Amino acid sequence: MSGLPLPYAVTGREEETADTATLTLEPVADPLPPFRPGQFAMVGSFGHGEVPLSFSGGSPSTETLAHTVRAVGPVTRALFALRTGHQLTVRGPYGTGWDLSGAVGHDVLVIAGGLGLAPLRPLLLHALGRVQDFSSVSVLIGARSPDDVLYGAQSGEWAVRTRVARTVDRPGPGWEGEVGVVTTLLGRTPYRPERTSAFLCGPEVMMRATARELMRRGVPAARVQVSLERNMRCGTGHCGHCQLGPLLLCRDGPVVRWDEAGPLLAVREL
């Protein structure tokens, strides 16, 4: 972990949607230590501040990083506006990562809602790199509209190697896929509940509904992992802004098993 912001240069920019882009970054000098899928970094724009962003890709061997950012506030709008050659700062990596070790021999479900596909992408790429270790790998993607689905071209490549299903809330012209919430895809996806490991990221209401549906179908709560989001400021567990009950999510999360996260999220306004 690097406690100091390190300068990185934007070496690539892929516009995913009208307000979302994936930035490919290379270190200007010293690189960050290697990250694990599911961890995050504090990414800064000079003169604007910094925000927590999950790693959405990259390669420890080449010191490359990738972050997918949606323009929703002053800092993220500044990051979204960066182009190739511009610089930003990165510190981290922070938090817990996805644990695939217990999923060997299982059916793996990767379930994303909206921007939640970004923190799941490194996990998915890692799983596809060792797909022979799992009984099956299925990717279920939910989005507001067809224009809001991330990584469109890449998800087509994933579909060649594994099962990918998409659903949207509001279909547009030419959309021939499913319409509805992402939980509707569970009934159309083959998996053995008692031998399933599920990885969820998306809006909190989507994760609660999906986790409950998985448990209703027989998936153990300890086999469901979620990535949680709170107001992360320091990244080191000192400021307390990201507290969720006994957890400080920048330290004890963002990835938490549902048997621990579920009871906490059931407490209103916790």
Image (cartoon, grey):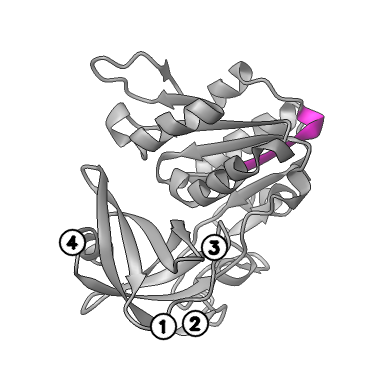
- Please give the name of the residue rendered at 64% of the width and 64% of the height, measured from the top-left corner: 245
- Residue 206 shown in magenta: no
Left or right: 80 as drawn, with respect to 22: left
Say whether disc 3 or disc 1 marks the residue closer to the N-terminus.
Answer: 1
Nearer to us of marks 1 and 4 is 1
The disc at residue 83 is 4
Does dot 2 land on a helix, a strand or a loop?
A: strand
Nearer to us of marks 2 and 1 is 1
The disc at residue 39 is 3
Residues packed near mark 4 inside 10 Å, few (<14), some (14 to 19) or many (20 plus): some
The disc at residue 2 is 2
Does dot 4 land on a helix, a strand or a loop?
A: loop
- Chain part drawn in magenta: 193-199
Nearer to us of marks 3 and 1 is 1
Say whether disc 1 or disc 4 marks the residue closer to the N-terminus.
Answer: 1
Residues packed near mark 2 inside 10 Å, few (<14), some (14 to 19) or many (20 plus): some
The amino acid type, in three-letter code, at marker 1 is: Asp
Location of mark 1 (residue): 30
The quadrant where residue 80 appears: bottom left
The amino acid type, in three-letter code, at marker 2 is: Ser
The amino acid type, in three-letter code, at marker 3 is: Gln
- Please give the name of the residue rendered at 26% of the width and 63% of the height, measured from the top-left corner: 11
Say whether disc 3 or disc 2 marks the residue closer to the N-terminus.
Answer: 2
